[in-house]
Amino acid sequence: MSHLTAKEAFSKLPQKLHNFFIKFPPRPFAQYAEKPSTIKDPTMNPFLPNKNPETGRWHGAKYSLRRSADLIKMARKFGIQDLLPPLPNKKFYEDKYNQKNWMRGILRQKGQKWERTLPEKLEARKKAIEDMDNIILEARPTYRKRLAKREKNKRTWF
């Protein structure tokens, strides 16, 4: 069983991964920012957007999400995914599978908007009907006579 040197192992990587590690050295040798930084920052992360401090404009990530996903998949195949810079979206393979909400639309369906808001509307309507006399009194003070008349008619003979 022959042991490969680091240079030989590096040369056997796929061309895309090889070129990436030439432009952005592996992580133990270089540290990369976890969050977006400036374009002049030596720890700039190629997977994140970075800001130009002079103009205030944002530069998009050097590697798009699709290209970074391809690099991650290749690196994972060779067991060197830890050497890549930190990723904006860290959910890949097992993480995505383990954290998936499998019965999302079955256990609690979304429903139409009117179905979701109906209980609150009915509650508000019920409360408004109970307070209707007070609401009318605020708008029309003469309504007090009608309320008194209603109370008088409610009385029974006993």
Image (spheres, rainbow, N blue to C red):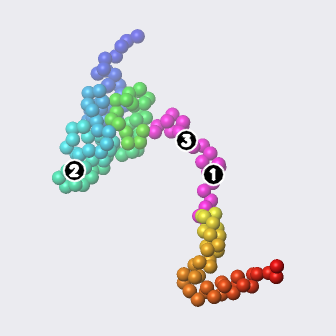
* Residue at (49% x, 36% y) in the render: 95
Mark 2 to mark 3: distance in Å? Answer: 37 Å
Q: Are marks 2 and 3 in contact (CB under 8 Å)?
A: no
Across and down, in percent, residue 138 comes to 54, 81
Q: Which residue is mark 3?
A: 100
* Residue at (57% x, 78% y) in the render: 135
Is the C terminus in the top left, top right, bottom left or bottom right quadrant?
bottom right
Mark 1 to mark 3: distance in Å? Answer: 15 Å
In the image, residue 131 sits, relative to residue 24, either above or below, namely: below
Q: Amino acid at mark 3?
A: Lys
In the image, residue 35 sits, relative to residue 78, either above or below, namely: below
Q: Amino acid at mark 1?
A: Arg
| Nearest to the observer: residue 2 or residue 58 | 58
Label 3, secondary structure: give it. Answer: loop
Q: In the displayed image of the protein, which residue is found farthest to the left?
A: 54
Q: Amino acid at mark 2?
A: Asn
Residue extent of the magenta highlight: 91-116
Residue 102 among magenta residues: yes
Going from N to C along the chain, the mark reached first, 1 or 3, is 3
Residue 30, by quadrant, is: top left
Residue 154 among magenta residues: no
Q: Which residue is mark 2?
A: 52
The answer to whether residue 100 is visible is yes
Q: Which residue is mark 1?
A: 108
| Nearest to the observer: residue 155 or residue 57 | 155
Crowding around mark 3 (Cα neighbors within 10 Å: few <14, some 14 to 19, many 20+) is: few
Mark 1 or 3: in front is 1
* Residue at (82% x, 82% y) in the render: 157
Tell me, for residue 137, which label it has, or none.
none
Mark 1 to mark 2: distance in Å? Answer: 45 Å
